[in-house]
Amino acid sequence: MSDVISSNFVRRDLLAERPAPVKTTGFIGLMRTRLFNSPTNILLTILGALLLWFTIVPSVKFLMVDAVWSGKDRAACLTENAGFAVGACWPYIQAKLPQLIYGFYPEAERWRVNLTLLLAVVLLLPLLIPRLPAKSLNAGLFFVAFPVVAFFLLHGGGIKGFGLSWTAGLLQLFDESIVGAGQALLTSSRTSAIGPLLWGLGSLIVLLGTVIHWLIFPLTWLRDYIQGTGQPVWADFAVTAAIVCVIAFVLGGGVRTGGRALASSIATFIGIAVVIRLLDLDHGGLPIVTTNLWGGLLVTLVVSVTGIVTSLPIGIALALGRRSTIPLIRVFSIAFIEFWRGVPLITVLFFATYMLPLFLPGNFTVDGLVRALIGIALFTGAYQAENVRGGLAAIPRGQSEAAAALGLSWWKTTSLIVLPQALRHVIPNLVNSFISLFKDTSLVSIVALFDLLGSLRASFADPKWSTPSTAFTGFAFAGIIYFLFCFGMSRYSLFVERRLNAHRRN
């Protein structure tokens, strides 16, 4: 056996000390690794610091250090009276704050605006918090019930009928429009070179209108009979509720499974009856406040929230229609999208405000604010359609094929598989459009609607607060309001994006 020679080595001298590692965390680590780690970054850091110094410091000095915080009129915000360089005139904002929030809304009725905003917050917050239950009920209340309640709270007035009377009125208006068009053709046929053709076409249209008149005659007769009773609102309400409940019971499955739909319909109509009674809608309701008295932040929120809520369903429908295999639907969707994206929003607002009434029947009018809301919803919906279409294009074809292999219909495939994934992909684009819409609401001032900026500019005309710093203070306050809303939307979108895309993070 060979001898195994082993040797052990023991160091007698200590190793020389090495320099400590460079700190890469905290403020010092940020300075070393991000701000001053190269000549280019050093130059950019210096330029950024100078930019902040010449923008942030004067802004803070104007808004806080040199600002005037108390006073009763413009005298408190003048340099010769204050004895120093005057910055922001915050007493002006305090004096004009009701006008900036409510516009010219009557002071005695402003509790209605406050109640509407409170209801909006109470119904919206549970939708934004993912862990809270009853999302379906809450969504139904916010998107269906709240707009109706908000309209009667903000605008006021009552109702003279209910669903049956409203349906009969719309059908009768449609019939009158058809008959009027046919009679116009008959009149023009007397002086036109193609008179026989116009006379034949007009006769067919008048005949069609006559047929529609007799088809809807039972409905209009029942409407007139109900209006002749002592309580037309409640009689119409009872008939409408009975008809809707029967339809819901039959469509819900009849005796076997229709009980749930029937119970839901009854609960809905009970809630509607409570609202009618609380707002006294059957006896004229609250005093009417016309929309030309609305203004300030109220108009900004009404226009932006309505545009955001209505534009997304319109965009989804147009995006799906553009990908449809039915040529008529696809061509209509493409034409609609390209038309509304090809005109500026100012043109849309002018058309909706001043030209749309020319195309409506003489006895049919639409409020100016409603016309602007319709134009903004259609305009923004066209842009949202392209955002949604981008998300649909990102979904692999295998998703739809797998759903078809499982036997799912097109509706279930689209609503349960394709659309949720597509919308998750385009959350940044959708929220970007929402933020842009919120800021574009200032354009409604060109059609005589006083939003936040419109009310702000109107307040400049008050000589009681005419100072050199009044305009700067007002625009700074409006900028803070816009920033808070837009920044809040952007941060919430990041939260939703992280939560929905948790499985995609590295």
Image (cartoon, rainbow, N blue to C red):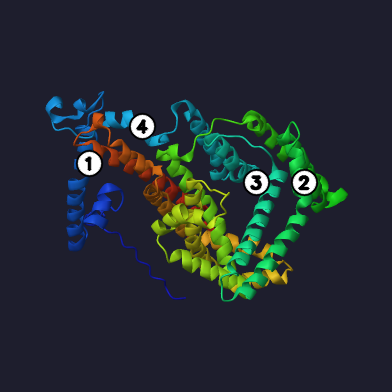
Quarter of the image for residue 233 reads top right
Tell me the element at label 4. helix
Looking at the image, is mark 1 or mark 2 earlier in the sequence? 1
Looking at the image, is mark 2 or mark 3 earlier in the sequence? 3
Q: Amino acid at mark 2?
A: Trp
Quarter of the image for residue 199 reads bottom right
* Horizontal relation, residue 206 to residue 456: left or right: right
Label 1 to label 3: alpha-carbon separation: 46 Å
Tell me the element at label 1. helix
Q: Which mark is residue 59?
A: 1
Image depth: mark 2 or mark 3 in front: 2
Q: Residue at x 54, y 60 (%)?
A: 315
Label 2 to label 3: alpha-carbon separation: 38 Å
Q: Residues within 10 Å of mark 4 (few under 14, many from 20)?
A: some
Q: Residue at x 54, y 30 (%)?
A: 287
Does residue 344 sit above or below 298 in this rendering?
below
Image depth: mark 3 or mark 4 in front: 4
Q: Residue at x 37, y 36 (%)?
A: 100
Q: How far from the left and from the top, in percent, is residue 236?
A: 74, 39
Q: Amino acid at mark 3?
A: Ser
Q: How far from the left and from the top, in percent, is residue 285?
A: 60, 31
Label 1 to label 2: alpha-carbon separation: 68 Å
* Horizontal relation, residue 394 to residue 104: left or right: right
Q: Which residue is mark 2?
A: 221
Q: Residues within 10 Å of mark 3 (few under 14, many from 20)?
A: few
Image depth: mark 4 or mark 1 in front: 4
Q: Which residue is mark 3?
A: 136
Label 2 to label 4: alpha-carbon separation: 52 Å
The answer to whether residue 265 of the structure is visible from this angle is no
* Horizontal relation, residue 96 to residue 205: left or right: left
Looking at the image, is mark 2 or mark 4 earlier in the sequence? 4
